Image: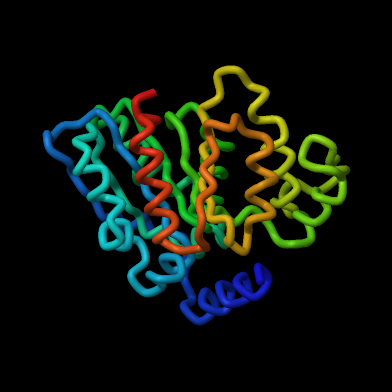
Amino acid sequence: MARRLAAVIILAVLVGGCSGKKPLETLTYESDPLHNKGLIVFLQGMGGTTSCFIAGHKCFATEGLVEAVRSRGLPYDMAAPAAHFGYYKDRTLEQRLRTDIILPAKARGYTKIWLVGVSMGGLGSVLYLKRHPDDISGILTLGPFLGYDKIIDEIVAAGGVQQWQPGSFDKHKDWQRMLWQWLKEYNQQPDAAPIFLGYGTSDPYVQAHKLLASTLPPEQVFAEDGGHSFTTFRNIWEVFLDRGHLDR
């Protein structure tokens, strides 16, 4: 199933012909009161993720994730860049996020910045944390895509993330081994910004999610009934907010 979903995603990208060389188009959502010190940056899935394939980054508002923050009176503004697959394909995602959003946000006085990514955007949040760990306060990755079946099956066959050895590989070409090697070692750092994981138990990427969950403290993992959809992600988001993790 994961292979079929990935094939659909790749076909959509090829048809769309997206490029990742332009500055990020970004929707912004201010909360009341104004001049908050916190900023949440939502990273979209491929085309917006399943139920919002066309709407893309607008889905964080239409699917209720923005209102969930506002209704709780949390001191966070929000931003949703159109970080489509082109930025991943061109390997410009981290640079564009930092140049177009993160550094300007810091210059405007934001002191807490969280990345919240769904599906492909979950991968993007991990990649940004890997490259710029001091820029952000933490990430919540929802139903993240973390590699194709071959690498996931290899890690499972090895007995899990800690038992798995990546072997020698080209870090410029094999991003999947690079990613999992980093995830294997990341939480051994005492002052590392936290990675939170949320996923549906029927998600096609659930095997990868369970591998990542095994590297995280239990309180940083949210497994809910559901699949790879905004309904599941919104439910997890509300639980995450209600547990006060943005207050850390």
From what the image shows, is residue 233 above or below residue 104? below
Across the whole image, how many numbered discs are drawn on residues? 0
For the point 15% across and 32% down, the residue is: 35
For the point 57% across and 77% down, the residue is: 8
Q: Quadrant of residue 161?
A: top right
Lateral position of residue 185 relative to residue 230, left or right: right
Counting from the top left corner in percent of width and height, residue 223 is at: 54, 47
Counting from the top left corner in percent of width and height, residue 40 is at: 33, 41
For the point 86% across and 51% down, the residue is: 157
Q: Classify the position of the N terminus by image quarter.
A: bottom right
For the point 45% across and 66% down, the residue is: 49
Please name whichever residue, 173 or 163, is drawn nearer the observer in this view of the structure.
163
Please name whichever residue, 6 or 130, is drawn nearer the observer in this view of the structure.
6
Please name whichever residue, 213 or 225, is drawn nearer the observer in this view of the structure.
225
Q: Which residue, as the protein is rendered here, is positioned at the far top?
A: 190
Q: Quadrant of residue 230?
A: bottom left
From what the image shows, is residue 9 above or below residue 236? below
From what the image shows, is residue 79 above or below residue 163? below
Q: Classify the position of the C terminus by image quarter.
A: top left
Q: Which residue, as the protein is rendered here, is positioned at the far bottom?
A: 15
Counting from the top left corner in percent of width and height, residue 98 is at: 42, 41
Q: Quadrant of residue 167?
A: top right
Q: Which residue, as the protein is rendered here, is positioned at the far front?
A: 225
Q: Which residue, as the protein is rendered here, is positioned at the far left?
A: 33
The figure's colour scheme reads: rainbow
